[in-house]
């Protein structure tokens, strides 16, 4: 069974610090990985996609992928209180149109 | 990314009744998905809805309980039938993007009394 594991948190970081969110996946054939942000009472919003090993940066967000270790991470630099949300990691297997979601990590950025 | 709307945004229903949730997309998409998200939980895929074919249901979900229609490439409905309080949840539709990502509608918050 394909699984995506995340630490449920809550992860608390002070404003301005780097928040590091981690995710592991069980399906070695997974090819595509996504990070979603979900504010309380709202639907998930895609913030990062990553498909190859290494780092991908977009503004304050950096996604990191290590397929050998089956590990994906999301770094949020200069964390702001508005970053406080639940972050969901998702993986898609090779040739699969379905996403497997982790249970999410709740992030709190303390002013 | 596609703009997705859902109706209703929320509803309170009585046990034993049915509710149909609509999902409208502003562009044609091949794949649409229906998820359930119970309080404090992650997303659970109910079914995949492809235009012109029967929906594909995930383990634990059956057509009699969650009938789905997909009459065209911009619209789908999910019906929650013979509801019980255990069906209280947020129901989300999503569409698949070109990179394999999914974009979500705003969700329908359902409370069953």
Image (cartoon, coloured by chain):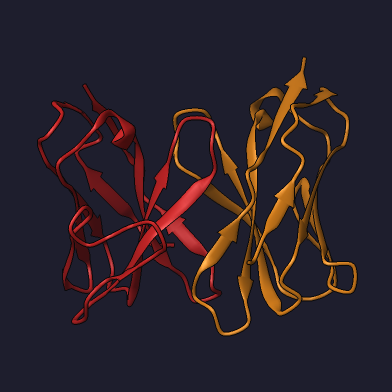
Chain colours: A orange, B red
Asked if B18 appears above or below B44 in the picture, the reply is above
The quarter of the picture where residue A26 lies is: bottom right
Q: Position of residue B44 (x, y in %)?
A: 46, 51
Quadrant including the N terminus of chain A: bottom right
Q: Position of residue B96 (x, y in %)?
A: 43, 69
Quadrant including the C terminus of chain A: top right
Asked if B109 appears above or below A109 in the picture, the reply is below
The residue under the point 75% across, 23% down is: A109
Q: Position of residue A28 (x, y in %)?
A: 76, 76
The residue under the point 67% across, 28% down is: A84
Answer left or right for A19 relative to B33: right
Q: Position of residue B65 (x, y in %)?
A: 21, 52
Extreme residue toward the front, this view: B60
Extreme residue toward the bottom, this view: A95
Q: Nearer the viewer, residue B60 or A21?
A: B60
Extreme residue toward the top, this view: A111
The quarter of the picture where residue B73 lies is: bottom left
Q: Nearer the viewer, residue B46 or B94?
A: B46
Answer left or right for A62 relative to B112: right
The quarter of the picture where residue A3 lies is: bottom right
């Amino acid at each position: 069974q394909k699984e995506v594991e995340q630490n449920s948190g809550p992860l608390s970081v002070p404003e301005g610090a780097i928040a590091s969110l981690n995710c592991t996946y069980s399906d070695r054939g997974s090819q595509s990985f996504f990070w979603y942000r979900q504010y309380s009472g709202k639907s998930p919003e895609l913030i990062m996609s990553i498909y190859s090993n290494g780092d991908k940066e977009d503004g304050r967000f950096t996604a990191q992928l290590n397929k050998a270790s089956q590990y994906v991470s999301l770094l949020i630099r200069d964390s702001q209180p508005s970053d406080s949300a639940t972050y969901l990691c998702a993986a898609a297997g090779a040739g699969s149109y379905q996403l497997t979601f982790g249970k999410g990590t709740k992030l709190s950025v303390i002013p | 990314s596609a703009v997705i709307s859902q109706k209703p945004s929320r509803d309170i229903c009585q046990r034993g009744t049915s509710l149909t949730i609509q999902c409208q997309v502003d562009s044609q998409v091949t794949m649409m998905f229906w998820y359930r998200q119970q309080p404090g939980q992650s997303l659970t895929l109910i079914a995949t809805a492809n235009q012109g074919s029967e929906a594909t249901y995930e383990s634990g979900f059956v057509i009699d309980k969650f009938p789905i229609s997909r009459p065209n490439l911009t619209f789908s409905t999910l019906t929650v039938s013979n509801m019980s309080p255990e069906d209280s949840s947020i129901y989300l539709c999503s569409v698949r993007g070109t990179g394999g990502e999914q974009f979500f509608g705003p969700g329908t918050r359902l409370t069953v009394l």
